[in-house]
Amino acid sequence: MLESSLDRLAQQILGLDEASLSSLWEKYKKRMEHFEPSKEWEKAVIIFFIINAVRAKNHIFNEQLLRQQETGPEKPPRGKPELRLVKS
């Protein structure tokens, strides 16, 4: 139940536009920095970290795409793996 809820939530978050989220980053950063013991503050913290998570995911994704374009896709090793004696 919990895992399927998180899966649905992740799917919804993946559908959000990073540019739109980034425009909200400063608002939720400020809201988070001004602590108050309320549900609104807690939600602001979660939203702030969701925005950061999407930005980090996209950064990693883009870096990996660039790396693959430069070096080509990783190919699985063929034949026997290269082994060496470490300790006798």
Image (spheres, helix red, strand yellow):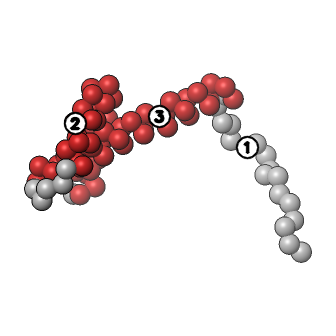
Query: What's the residue at 30%, 39% (across, down)?
Result: 51
Q: In the structure shown, which secondary structural element does the residue marked by tag 1 occupy?
A: loop
Q: In the structure shown, which secondary structural element does the residue marked by tag 3 occupy?
A: helix
The crowd level at tag 3 (other Cα within 10 Å; few <14, some 14-19, many 20+) is few
Reply above or below: 40 against 25: below
Q: Let me know if residue 72 appears in the view.
A: yes
Measured as percent of width and height from the top left, residue 79 is found at: 79, 46
Measured as percent of width and height from the top left, residue 78 is found at: 76, 42
Query: What's the residue at 32%, 35% (across, down)?
Result: 14
- In this view, the residue in front, 29 or 43, is 29
Instruction: Name the residue beneath numbered marker 1.
Output: 77
Q: CA distance from mark 2 to mark 3?
A: 21 Å
Reply above or below: 88 against 62: below
Q: Could you tell me the amino acid type at mark 2?
A: Lys
Query: What's the residue at 58%, 27% (across, down)?
Result: 66
Which label sits in the foreground, 2 or 3?
2
Instruction: Name the residue beneath numbered marker 3.
Output: 59
